[in-house]
Image: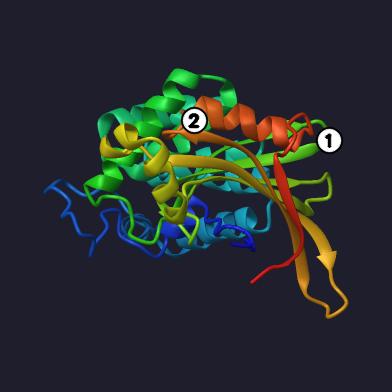
Amino acid sequence: MIVSGALRVTILALAASLPTAAHGQAIAAPARKASETIADLLDKMNEDQRTRFNQGRTAYTEKRYSDAMVIHQALLKDFPGDPVLLKFCSQSAIQNNDPGFAVKTLKPIAESDPQDWQAAAMLMRGCAETGDTACRDAELTHLLDLHSQGITPPNLRELAVEHLKVGDKTLAINFSLIPWGPYKTYAAGDVNDAAGKLLMTISLESSDFDQASFAKDHPDDAARGVRLFSLDAYEETGTNSSGQRTQTHYTYKFFTGQPSYATIRQDFIDVAGGKAKPVSSRSGLVVQ
């Protein structure tokens, strides 16, 4: 498959149009007291407060993260300890390169409501970007469990784990709640230049059509449900003579069984930084 870029959705942007507990999934969510939603908060606000709240959301959308945080923090004077406002502040802090604030703010929310997937998702990223790998991995495992219970929204395909610098580039790593696409992508990393231009997408894949040959060569592993995984990348190569967007596809290595997030992270960094060497490549591929 030639990828055109994975779906990227901020947690609270998605939550604005969805209830906290997902509906319509194969596994029913257990009965619980629902977390406060944006609609719940708006119902408690007067017209002036709602106007200011929406001004903060607009500032966030326009990437004025400091402004958004100031506006939502001011509203906390009227609604002290409100979890929705605290999550909005935390999301702005993460985007404004202050993940430590987010971790400090989100931990009490996540601990008081273990089924608040929004708090867990943002806490995971905050922990990742402060270097707390134990917290990062614990929250990732917890979010996968919440997904298996049907608590995360059904159209939440990926989780933003962390953004990091690799030389003069930025690498944004996302982990899949549901392996997606014909190549079954389990994790994806967008590599952008300093101007924000997409240069490459790195992926951890486990294609169904690779499993038959894997089972033939590793029957015992396959019998236990172990899958073959590959580390791939899709480099942007501009347009062809017909004006179609093109990429070069690289395969770097294979794994017997799904690697840990720590392994995925390091391999993505090595590819983004040019330290990894591909074992095969195909150029001039048209993006569908």
Q: Which residue is mark 2?
A: 261
Classify 286 as above or below 189.
below
Measuring 33% from the left and 60% from the top, which residue is drawn there? 154
Classify 207 as above or below 270.
below
Q: Nearer the viewer, residue 55 or 237?
A: 237
The tag on residue 156 is none
Measuring 77% from the left and 29% from the top, which residue is drawn there? 275
Work out which quarter of the rendered image holds the N terminus and state it: bottom right
Q: Is residue 274 left or right of residue 252?
A: right
Residue 165 percent coordinates (x, y): 73, 32
Work out which quarter of the rendered image holds the C terminus and state it: bottom right
Residue 238 percent coordinates (x, y): 84, 64
Can you tell which quarter of the image residue 100 is in? Answer: top right
Measuring 52% from the left and 56% from the top, which residue is drawn there? 9
Measuring 73% from the left and 40% from the top, which residue is drawn there? 170
Going by the numbered disc 1, the residue's amino acid type is Asp
Going by the numbered disc 2, the residue's amino acid type is Tyr
CA gap between label 2 and label 1 equals 23 Å
Can you name the residue that lies furthest to the bottom here? 242
Residue mark closest to the camera, 2 vs 1: 2
The tag on residue 168 is 1
Residue 42 percent coordinates (x, y): 37, 60
Q: Secondary structure at mark 1?
A: loop
